[in-house]
C-alpha cells in the first residue's frame, strides 16, 4: 500500500505514545505544561504514523484544548445518568462519555 509505514515503525509509535501518556500522568502534579507537551508529542506521533490513540488514553485528553486531564488536578470527574462527565479546568469544556454495560 502506497504511503503506509512498516509494521515495526507502527509498533514503536504505539509504544512511544503509551510511554508519553505514562510520563504525563507522573508529572502532571508538578508541571501541567510539561504534561500537556507530552500529550501533544503523543498526538503528533499518532498523526505521523497513522496510529490511533487507544480509547482508554484518549479519555485523558480534552477534546477542545487538547490538555491532559488528570482527576482532581486538571479535571473534575462525575457520573450522572450512566454518563461520565469530565470537566476540563483549563478551558471549562465538559466532555461526556457513555458508561455502557461493559
Image (cartoon, rainbow, N blue to C red):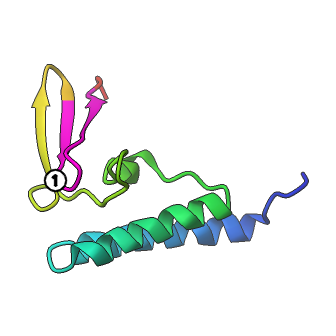
Task: Give left or right: position of 14 versus 65.
Answer: right
Give the answer, above or below, for where 92 lies relative to 66: above
Please tell me which residue is depicted at 19% across the width and 45% down the height of the picture.
92
Give whichever of 65, 13 is nearer the camera: 65
Q: Which residue is mark 1?
A: 89
- Specify whether residue 97 is painted magenta: yes
Which stretch is magenta?
84-99
Please tell me which residue is depicted at 21% across the width and 72% down the height of the picture.
28
Task: Give left or right: position of 12 versus 36.
Answer: right
Task: Give left or right: position of 9 versus 95.
Answer: right
Q: Position of residue 66 (x, y in %)?
A: 37, 55
Give the answer, above or below, for where 37 lies relative to 78: below
Q: Position of residue 48 (x, y in %)?
A: 66, 64
Q: Position of residue 37 (x, y in %)?
A: 38, 73
Q: Secondary structure at mark 1?
A: loop
Which quadrant, please, contains the C terminus? top left
State which quadrant residue 86 falls in: top left
Amino acid at each position: 500500500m502506497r504511503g503506509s509505514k512498516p509494521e515495526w515503525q507502527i509498533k514503536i509509535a504505539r509504544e512511544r505514545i503509551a510511554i508519553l501518556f505514562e510520563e504525563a500522568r507522573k508529572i502532571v502534579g508538578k508541571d501541567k505544561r510539561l504534561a500537556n507537551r507530552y500529550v501533544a508529542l503523543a498526538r503528533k506521533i499518532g498523526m505521523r504514523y497513522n496510529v490511533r490513540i487507544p480509547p482508554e488514553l484518549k479519555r485523558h485528553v480534552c477534546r477542545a484544548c487538547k490538555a491532559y486531564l488528570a482527576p482532581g488536578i486538571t479535571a473534575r470527574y462525575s457520573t450522572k445518568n450512566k454518563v461520565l462527565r469530565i470537566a476540563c479546568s483549563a478551558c471549562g469544556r465538559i466532555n461526556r462519555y457513555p458508561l455502557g454495560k461493559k
